[in-house]
Image (cartoon, helix red, strand yellow):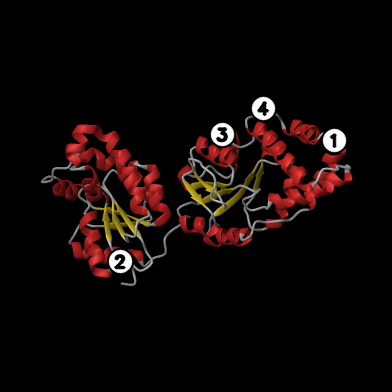
């Protein structure tokens, strides 16, 4: 029973690979409960063949996607997925967030022999589907088990496989800096307070911070859209703040003081250093990918010095997230690894997540307060949650 305790697994593979049979046999042998997503579909929507005929495959996949996410979050310890489950990226990522994924396979002739007597809706194209879907099965698989003999043999093979630690799912993590590993709020609060008092601003701290947030959100948003440059952002920052506060400010002087103070800051998000150290321990290449000014970022990143494999700062790259050219530059610089093995991790919906998705890599939103909405592949509230996915 030791193999299954604490291990929630999902079985994927072609029609005829024996996922449902193995799921029940494995749970019977080692304990746990089974969720068969095809059976779940039939209970909820009726017989699958009839549903295909009435609504078509697209409608089936939409419903299946929801069921995969539901199964991932259920109490079931063994999930048997339909042969086409890997066509549903959202559902598969939900499984990845909660399960170890096992690709159950067998030689093509054996799979076709098993399928022949069945009444599966896509049976006639089984040989083509086996070939077409094989890359997806391999992409999502944490483990591969060959089930070409008896059920008992497959159970033993699965148990033996699961005794091994799960391999890394990603070889490279592109990690945002501010509000991901560096504590921007602490750095900004310190630097803005010093700069504001030096500039003679009379507004209270609460008003100052509230107005500056409005300015910061606007100018960095415009930078992301390519509407302004870094130099223009610098010029605008405290001019706009002056207008909002209705106070006269020597904007260039305040900007210089703000820059000087930001360079001194070494604040990190709680747990960030341990997180980066664990990535290094696992052999995952980690690069900082940040929209920032070069002179400030290089100094502040000394807070995590020695814990990453490099940093790509937008001012130096020449493009800002979410511009795909920013990611193209990084991809080329790090040796063009397989995009399926790269993850963009950050707190910015419009920069980190939008940019990563536009470039065609997986994304993970760092939403510590749980109040953001995005189409990221994963959303986590802690570094521990991300380490479970990686």
Residue 330 image point, x, y percent: 59, 41
Q: Quadrant of the N terminus?
A: bottom left
Tell me the crowding category of disc 4: few under 14, some 14 to 19, or many 20 or more residues within 10 angstroms, Cα based.
few
Pointer 4: what residue? 227
Q: Are marks 4 and 1 in contact (CB under 8 Å)?
A: no
Q: Which mark is residue 159?
A: 2
Q: Residue at x 62, y 58 (%)?
A: 272
Instruction: Point out which mark residue 247 bears.
Output: 1
* Quarter occupied by residue 195: top right
Query: Taking the image as drawn, is residue 129 in sight?
Result: yes
Q: Which of marks 3 and 4 is nearer the N terminus?
A: 4
Rounded to the nearest angstrom, the CA distance separating label 3 from label 4 is 16 Å
Q: Earlier in the sequence, mark 4 or mark 1?
A: 4
Q: What is the distance, in whole Å, between disc 3 and disc 1 at their CAs?
A: 39 Å
Image disc number at residue 40: none
Secondary element type, mark 4: loop
Mark 3–mark 4 CB contact (< 8 Å): no
Which residue in the protein does label 3 denote?
Answer: 324
The tag earlier along the polypeptide, 2 or 3, is: 2
- The answer for how far apart the CA atoms under marks 1 and 2 are is 70 Å
Circle nearer the viewer, 1 or 2: 1
Does 169 appear above or below 215?
A: below
């Amino acid at each position: 029973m030791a193999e299954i305790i604490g291990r929630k697994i999902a079985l994927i593979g072609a029609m005829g690979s024996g996922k449902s049979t193995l799921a029940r046999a494995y749970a019977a042998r080692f304990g746990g409960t089974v969720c068969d997503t095809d059976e779940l579909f039939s209970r909820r929507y009726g017989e699958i063949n009839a549903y295909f005929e009435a609504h078509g495959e697209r409608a089936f996949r939409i419903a299946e996607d929801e069921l995969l996410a539901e199964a991932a979050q259920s109490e079931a310890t063994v999930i048997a997925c339909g042969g086409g489950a890997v066509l549903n990226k959202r559902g598969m990522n939900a499984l990845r967030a909660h399960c170890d994924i096992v690709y159950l396979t067998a030689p093509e002739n054996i799979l076709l022999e098993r399928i022949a007597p069945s009444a599966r809706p896509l049976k006639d194209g089984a040989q083509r589907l086996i070939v077409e879907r094989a890359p997806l099965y391999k992409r999502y698989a944490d483990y591969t088990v060959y089930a070409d003999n008896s059920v008992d043999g497959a159970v033993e093979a699965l148990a033996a496989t699961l005794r091994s630690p799960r391999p890394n799912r990603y070889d490279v993590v592109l990690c945002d800096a501010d509000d991901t590993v560096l504590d921007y709020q602490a750095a900004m609060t310190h630097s803005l307070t010093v700069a504001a008092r030096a500039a003679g601003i009379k507004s209270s701290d609460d008003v100052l911070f509230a107005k500056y947030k409005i300015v910061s959100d606007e100018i960095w948003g415009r930078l992301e859209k390519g509407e302004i440059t870094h130099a223009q952002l610098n010029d605008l920052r405290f001019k706009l703040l002056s207008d909002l506060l209705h106070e006269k400010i020597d904007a260039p002087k305040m900007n210089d003081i703000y820059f000087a103070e930001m360079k001194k800051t070494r604040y990190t998000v709680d747990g960030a250093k341990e997180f980066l150290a664990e990535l290094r321990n696992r052999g995952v290449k980690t690069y900082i990918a940040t929209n920032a000014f070069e002179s400030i970022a290089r100094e502040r990143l000394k807070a995590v010095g020695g814990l990453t494999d490099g940093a790509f700062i937008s001012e130096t790259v020449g493009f800002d997230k979410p511009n795909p050219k920013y990611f193209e530059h990084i991809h080329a610089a790090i040796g063009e690894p397989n995009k399926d093995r790269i993850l963009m991790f950050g707190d910015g919906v419009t920069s980190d997540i939008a940019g990563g998705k536009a470039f065609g890599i997986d994304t993970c939103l760092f939403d510590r307060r749980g109040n953001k909405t995005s189409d990221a592949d994963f959303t986590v509230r802690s570094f521990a949650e991300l380490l479970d996915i990686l």
